[in-house]
Image (cartoon, rainbow, N blue to C red):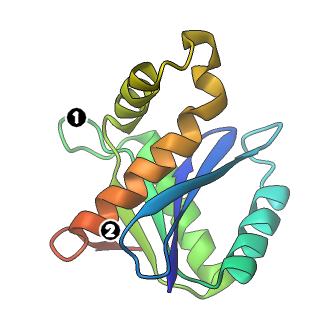
Amino acid sequence: MRILGIDFGSRTCGVAVSDPLGVTAQGLEIIRREKENHMRKTYRRIGELIRDLSVSAIVVGYPLNMDDSVGDRAMKSKAFGEELKARFHLPVFLCDERLTTVEADEVMEKLGVPREDHKKYVDKIAATIILQDWLNNHETNEIHV
């Protein structure tokens, strides 16, 4: 039982996957697209990952505002999760992802990744943080799409 974690952005999707026991998250890749609404290749790649990795559920980062309100980015992430659920017939969960980009930057600083290279990795690391957070806390913190 593997779980896919996705950090959904306007032009990228960072992707992570759990180990078969659902204990740890590992970063996989970043799916890039030319324009925000050009999603065909993104959905195709996610479908390939679901099939190849035997994914049983998906976790999508849900970027709430710091005051807990739902902004434009969170609404887009929820709509993306709803589309994933409709396309792939899997359970989809939303996971509060506030400050994951900051945390990803801190991880790269500690690892000595040069500042100019952070954009190459930040989405994949953020997806890993989102998925690991969900794995650690989902019993008490589930939001279904």
Quarter where residue 134 is shown: bottom left
Residue at horizontal 47%, vertical 51%? 128
In the picture as drawn, the residue positioned furthest to the front comes out as 111
Task: Give the x, y percent position of residue 102.
Answer: 36, 27
> SS at mark 2?
helix
Task: Give the x, y percent position of residue 121.
Answer: 60, 33
Q: Which residue is mark 1?
A: 66
5 horizontally vs 88: left or right: left
In this view of the protein, which residue sits in the foreground, 61 or 136?
Answer: 136
Residue at horizontal 21%, vertical 66%? 137
Q: Which residue is mark 2?
A: 135
Task: Give the x, y percent position of residue 97.
Answer: 35, 46
What kind of residue is marked 2? Answer: Leu
Q: Residues within 10 Å of mark 1 (few under 14, many from 20)?
A: few
What kind of residue is marked 1? Answer: Met
> SS at mark 1?
loop
Q: Quadrant of the C terminus?
A: bottom left
Task: Give the x, y percent position of residue 3.
Answer: 50, 74
In this view of the protein, which residue sits in the foreground, 128 or 21?
Answer: 21
In whole angstroms, how far apart are the C-alphas of marks 1 and 2? 22 Å
Residue at horizontal 45%, vertical 26%? 111
Give the mark, 1 or 2, whose residue is nearer the N terminus.
1
Q: In the rendered view, would you say 138 is above or below 108?
A: below
58 horizontally vs 49: left or right: left
